[in-house]
Each structure stands twice: as structure tokens, then as C-alpha cells.
Image: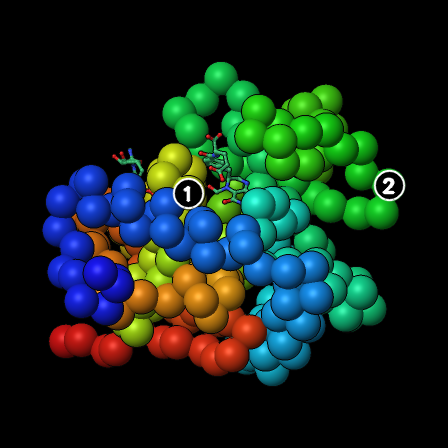
Amino acid sequence: MTFREMTPTSPSDKTAIRRELKRRRRILSAEQQKQAALALCQRLRKLPEICRARRISLYLPVNGEIDPTPLIPWLRQRRVAIYLPVLRPFSDNSLWFVAYGDTTPMVKNRFGIAEPCPRFAAQRRNRLPAWALDTLMVPLVGFDQHANRMGMGGGFYDRSLAFMRRPGPAPTLIGVAHACQQVDTLPIEPWDIPLNAVVSDTGVVRPTKTG
Ligand SMILES: Nc1nc2c(c(=O)[nH]1)N(C=O)[C@@H](CNc1ccc(C(=O)N[C@@H](CCC(=O)O)C(=O)O)cc1)CN2
Ligand SMILES: Nc1ncnc2c1ncn2[C@@H]1O[C@H](COP(=O)(O)OP(=O)(O)OP(=O)(O)O)[C@@H](O)[C@H]1O
């Protein structure tokens, strides 16, 4: 059975979809990964929300995630401040966004993802809460035609972005993924924060306007 044929509803469906979509990106070859990263970054450079951004977060890819880092030289040239997600210590699975430069001291977190080291992140001047960024690039495990998203399942981004349900600052959220991470329909959860767009190596998906 393909995901095209199934209507996902239960939490176990979600787990199965997540597993399948992680597999799809993991089996891409190094050459496919490289081409996808370049194609992604070409599209990102044309996106108005990225062109406007002055403070942007991206991520360092693991386990076959599409690589947004070819964008870094272009961002630096344009004096855009770059931040990386860091697992907040002693907290509720939410993220800090910590300044990322050529000399930033890095360590691997408990998931094996490189991030600015705790001592650096602990200094207030080196980090921002999500609401102070103007654009976040959100790593996706899956997305659908309406730009609904699925992440790693930790709820890190959803928790860090929960402030967006209330009036106030609203950074732009750009999901990024391989084209092969797209499925017809993903289940929407009450805590899901909608994305402004999903950009892949082959195109841009925007949510359909309602109301
Ligand atoms: N590159 C990258 N950085 C990121 C995220 C991400 O999705 N991608 N995150 C977005 O939230 C946060 C980390 N969240 C994570 C949540 C769950 C797992 C996880 O369950 N990992 C598996 C092993 C990897 C796998 O299954 O492929 C595990 O530990 O069992 C990893 C990271 C912050 N940094
Ligand atoms: N704002 C929130 N406050 C508390 N718990 C939350 C919040 N948002 C999500 N969660 C919890 O996080 C868990 C994971 O959510 P979900 O499966 O939707 O992750 P996801 O879509 O992969 O998101 P992410 O990319 O943020 O990890 C759920 O069990 C959910 O209850």
C-alpha cells in the first residue's frame, strides 16, 4: 500500500508515515543529496521571505535531511545573522536559537546533532528566543499539498512556536524537505503551528488560504 491510498488518522499511522519518510531520505545517495541541496538553496534564494530576512535560523542536517547550509555564504555576504536550534537545558523540550559563526564552539547534542556548546549558548547575548527571529527554516520529515508538516516527533518546534497562537511577533516559518518527503495528506494535530511555505528541491508549496 502506498501513502497515496491511505487516509492517516491514528497515532500509529503517524509513526508508520514518519518511519517511511525517514527511510526515503536516508536512502538518497551522496550525489542526490548534493544536487537536492543546491536545488533547494536556489529556490530559497528566490523566496521573498528569505530575501527579507535579517535574522534567520537554519539547521545542520542529519540522517538524510536536506542540507540548507549551501545558503550560508550567500546569507553571510548579505550580513544576515544566522542561528541554529539548540536543545534548551533543563526545559520542556523547547529550543533556543543560538548565533552561528565560523568560530562558534560546537558539540554534539543527545541526538548526535552538532550545536553551539552549552557555555556559549548560556550567554544571553549569543541567543534569541524564536519570536525574535524573522524567519525560521524548519526541518521536516514530511509535508503535504497544504503545507502541513511532520517533524521528528519530539514536538520541539511546536513547543518553541506555541507563542504564535497569541497576538504578537510572528516570524515566518519555512519548512524544508526533499521532494520525496511529500505525501497527499498529513493528519493535523491541535498543537501544529502552520507554515508559511514548504520549499523542496523541486518546488514551493503554500497553504491554501481559508476564511
Ligand atoms: N538537523 C536537525 N536539527 C534539529 C532538529 C531536526 O529535526 N533536525 N530538531 C527538530 O525537532 C531538534 C532536535 N529534535 C530531535 C527530535 C527527535 C530526534 C530523534 O528521535 N532521533 C532519533 C534518532 C534519529 C532517527 O530516528 O533518525 C532517536 O534519538 O531515536 C532527533 C532530534 C533540534 N535540532
Ligand atoms: N505546545 C506544546 N506544548 C506541549 N506539548 C506539545 C506542544 N506541541 C507539541 N507537543 C507534544 O509534542 C509531541 C510531538 O508532537 P508531533 O508528533 O506533532 O511532533 P512533530 O510534528 O514531529 O513536531 P516537531 O517538529 O516540533 O518535533 C506530542 O506528543 C505533543 O503532545
Please name the amino acid that badge 1 sits on.
Met
Tell me residue 74's x, y (percent): 77, 70
Q: Earlier in the sequence, mark 2 or mark 1?
A: 2
Circle 1 Cα neighbour tier, 10 Å, few/some/many (<14 / 14–19 / ≥20): some
For label 1, being within 8 Å of ligand 1 is answered yes
Examine the rendered structure and indicate whether residue 61 appears above or below residue 145: above
Q: Is the CB–ligand 1 distance for label 2 below 8 Å?
A: no
Please tell me the numbered disc located at residue 124.
none
Q: Is residue 79 visible?
A: no
* Disc 2 element: loop
| Residue at 68 percent of width and 24 percent of height | 118
Q: Is residue 5 left or right of residue 17?
A: left
| SS label for mark 1 | loop
Identify which residue, 65 or 102, lies in the foreground. Answer: 65
The image quadrant in which ligand 2 is located: top left
Foreground of the two, 38 or 58:
38
Classify residue 53 by image quadrant: bottom right
Q: Position of residue 174 (x, y in %)?
A: 47, 64
Q: Residue furthest right?
A: 103
Q: Which residue is mark 2?
A: 103
Q: Is residue 85 visible?
A: yes
Percent of width and height locating residue 2: 26, 63
Q: Residue at coordinates 14% horizontally, 60% vertically from top-left?
A: 7
Residue drawn at (68%, 29%) of the image: 108
Q: Is residue 206 above or below residue 162?
A: below
Q: Which residue is mark 1?
A: 152
